[in-house]
Amino acid sequence: MTMNFVVFESGSRAGLSAELFFEHYVDATGAKHRLFLSDLDEDFQHIVSRHPQVSLIHDRQAFEMLSAGEAVIFPADELTRQSNPVATQVASEHRFSCIEPHYYKKQHMNELLARATATCAIKVPETFSLTNVCVKPNSMSAGSRNIQFLDNACVMQKIDIDHEYVVDVLRYDDEKMYIFPREVTLKNGYDRFIKLLPLEGELAMHVTEFVKAACPSNDGMFSDIFHLQLCQDKKGDYYYIEFSKRISGTACVNILSGMSPFAMIDGIDQELNSGMIDGCWRRFEDFMLMMK
């Protein structure tokens, strides 16, 4: 079935990733889907895509399409599906885009995951019960210097981070999932340097264990298309940091390993490629040059 996909907040790396995944998929398969990249910035709609099946539009047009039942939402956005009732409703009609409000209640999710994954190699940092907090240094201080007052905060154990990871997951059913892990160094929240990790290596095995312990069936937060942010401390222990029910912003680097979320949506299997798993660090831009 031919589908029109909308991606919100497309002026970001996640929008770029969605576009590259889409181009790679339709060029390889001949699928007739259309992709509409949407953004609030008025100038965004004036950009012309290099691909005939990709259009760049303003959010106004995207919501008109969704309200008319002419499109579905591809999960590359974060805030729009949470905050806009039209987007939330349309997203709920499809497994791959559906979200639940409690996914974004950090304390609740940490406590839920800690119970479900207590025996897993990936640990959930200790999460404290207070949400309205006053944070002050546990040492010498003068007056109110370095004191923070926070409302509705999730207060968790600080990890002495040695390595950081992002793991994209495509889950087809209760058992079958494809895991695309990478080690990253971050700058302003974006992957700056990237090292692709083995698709069936140690971290991938730990992620499989963690996901199945939290969600034994392909339903809910760890279903269909999602990604995890993880870390490893100086003792070698792995910790959960965050998850999102969407592709990661820089997920397009996994195209070289065979990741194809549009294939998953169409029920087509992945053709994996381990040729790039060579232990080398690369800039994000290096991956873009390889995909030209």
Image (cartoon, rainbow, N blue to C red):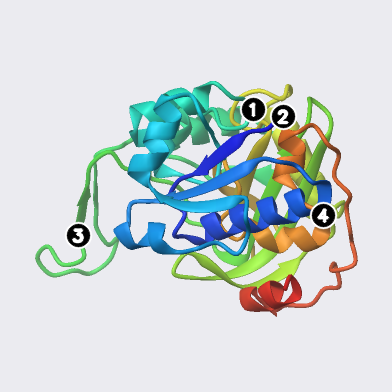
Q: Amino acid at mark 4?
A: Gly
Q: Please state the horizontal and vertical placement of residue 171, each as a whole percent of the image.
A: 75, 35
Q: Please state the horizontal and vertical placement of residue 14, each as a whole percent of the image.
A: 54, 55
Work out which residue is located at the far front of the displayed protein and give it: 52
Q: Amino acid at mark 3?
A: Ile
Q: Which residue is mark 4?
A: 258
Q: Which residue is mark 1?
A: 116
Q: Which residue is mark 3?
A: 147
First along the sequence among labels 2 and 3: 3
Q: What is the C-alpha distance between the residues marked 3 and 4? A: 48 Å
Name the disc covering residue 261, or none: none
Q: Secondary structure at mark 4?
A: loop
Residue 230 appears anywhere in the view: no
Q: Please state the horizontal and vertical placement of residue 108, each as a whole percent of the image.
A: 45, 30
Work out which residue is located at the far left of the displayed protein and give it: 143
Asked if labels 1 and 2 touch by Cβ distance under 8 angstroms, the answer is yes
Question: Tag 2: Cα neighbours inside 10 Å, few (<14), some, or many (≥20)?
Answer: some
Q: Amino acid at mark 1?
A: Ala
Viewer-side label of 4, 2:
4
Residue 275's place in the image compared with 202, above or below, is below
Question: Tag 4: Cα neighbours inside 10 Å, few (<14), some, or many (≥20)?
Answer: some
Name the image quarter holding the C terminus: bottom right
First along the sequence among labels 3 and 4: 3
Q: Which residue is mark 2?
A: 213
First along the sequence among labels 2 and 1: 1
Viewer-side label of 3, 4:
4
Q: Amino acid at mark 2?
A: Ala
